[in-house]
Every structure is written in C-alpha cells, then in structure tokens.
Image (tube, grey):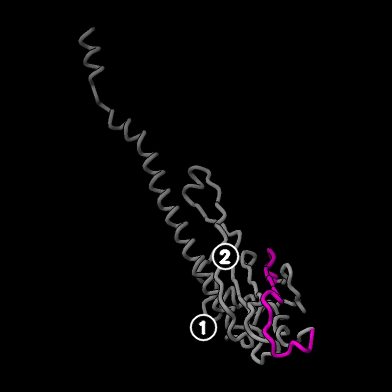
Amino acid sequence: MVMLHRRFSAAETGAAMVEAAIAMPLLLTLLLGFVDFGYAFYQWNAANKAVQAGARLAQISSPVASGLLLEAKTPSNSLDVGKAVPANTYNYICTANAAGTVSCTCGTGATCQNLTASQAAFDFIFSGSSSRAGMHSFLPMLTRSQVQIQYQASGLGYWTRPDGPVPTITVSIVNHQFQFFFLGGLLGFNNITMPSMLSTVTGEDLKSTWP
C-alpha cells in the first residue's frame, strides 16, 4: 500500500493538461486584450485624422454658422470700419443633436448677430463629397452628434473686410466611445469614452463651398 501511494503521488500523467487548462484562459484574455487595445489605438489615430480633415474643410468652405458672414462687415459702431476685429467679438459654437440636425449657440462673452446654422455646410464637413474626404471617411463609427465646430474671432482681419471674417476654427470630437469587441464579451468591459480631441486652424476663404 505504501509503494502504491508513492507511485501515485509521483505520477505526472495529465499534469500538462491541467496546467494548460489553467493557463489558456489567461493567455487568451491577454491575446484578445492586445487585439482590442490595438484597435482602440487605431480608433484614436483615426479620430485625430478626422478632426484634422474636418478643420481643413471648415477652413476653406462656407461656415456652418451662416451668421458669421455678417460679422466683420457690420460693426455696431460705424467709426470702427477698417479697424481690427477684437478677439472673441463673436464666438459661434455649432453642434448636432442625436438626429443630426445642426444648431449654433453663442459663446460666453461674445456677441453673435445671427445664430442661423447651415445643415449643408455641416454635412459637407462631416461626410465630405465625391472629391473630398470628410470626417466620417476617416472614422466610420463617428456620429454627427459627436462633432463640434467653433468659429471664434481671432483678432485678425478688420471690419468690412471684403473677403469676410478671419476666425479661429476649432473642430472637435466629443463623447466618442472606444469600442471593445473581445473584452466586452469575455469580461463585460463597457466601452470607454475617448478623451475629447480637437484641431484648430485659422479661416481662409469662407465665402466659397467646395464641390
């Protein structure tokens, strides 16, 4: 009986299978975690590219804030004609609701003459056209409600400037979610809100719209 007990305690038959059964779930979780976080990094890079592309389109096309074209043309004081437009004289912040309908508000401390928003201009920046890639082209998971476009007086340009105002344009992505596939299913990970990102440029020709 003693010899049988010693042989049984020294036997390693099936040990490798038990070790593999313990280790495989951990290794699989690590492997799929690397895949998921690699995909999250891809989404981060795509979002950065999307705000850069959106800012460029906003820089060279008709403004989403239609009232912006009235700024720098009609100063409240006629004696200001030809003078520089002070920084933050106007500050239009344009966003879309869940249905994708855009509207504009006026930032703190600024005066906005007309808060009318152009849906076509917003859609152009978001979707692009047949010849220009929009934000959605770089980040297909992006929704209109996650895009914010701001036109703020930069201190450049002057009242009654023939080519229109020279705003600082900031295109942002807010409340966008990192999507997890494997970790969400295996470990119940919820999607994580991506930190807001933005791209800022100075307006060029806001009178024209690209095809």
Q: Does the magenta stretch include residue 75?
A: no
Q: Name the residue under label 1.
A: 131
x, y percent for residue 64: 67, 77
187 displayed left or right of 11 = right
- Give the secondary structure at mark 1: loop
Q: Residues within 10 Å of mark 1 (few under 14, many from 20)?
A: few
x, y percent for residue 122: 64, 75
Q: How far apart are marks 2 and 1 (CA)?
A: 20 Å
All told, the count of numbered labels is 2
Q: Residues within 10 Å of mark 2 (few under 14, many from 20)?
A: many
Point out the stretch of residues depicted in magenta.
77-102
91 displayed left or right of 171 = right
At label 1, which amino acid type do we have? Ser
Quadrant that contains the C terminus: bottom right
Q: Residue at x 38, y 47 (%)?
A: 31
Vertical position of residue 59 compared to residue 24: above or below = below
- Which numbered tag is attached to residue 142? 2
Q: Earlier in the sequence, mark 2 or mark 1?
A: 1
Q: Residue at x 41, y 53 (%)?
A: 35
Vertical position of residue 32 compared to residue 42: above or below = above
- Give the secondary structure at mark 2: loop
Quadrant that contains the N terminus: top left
In the image, 116 versus 12, the foreground residue is: 116
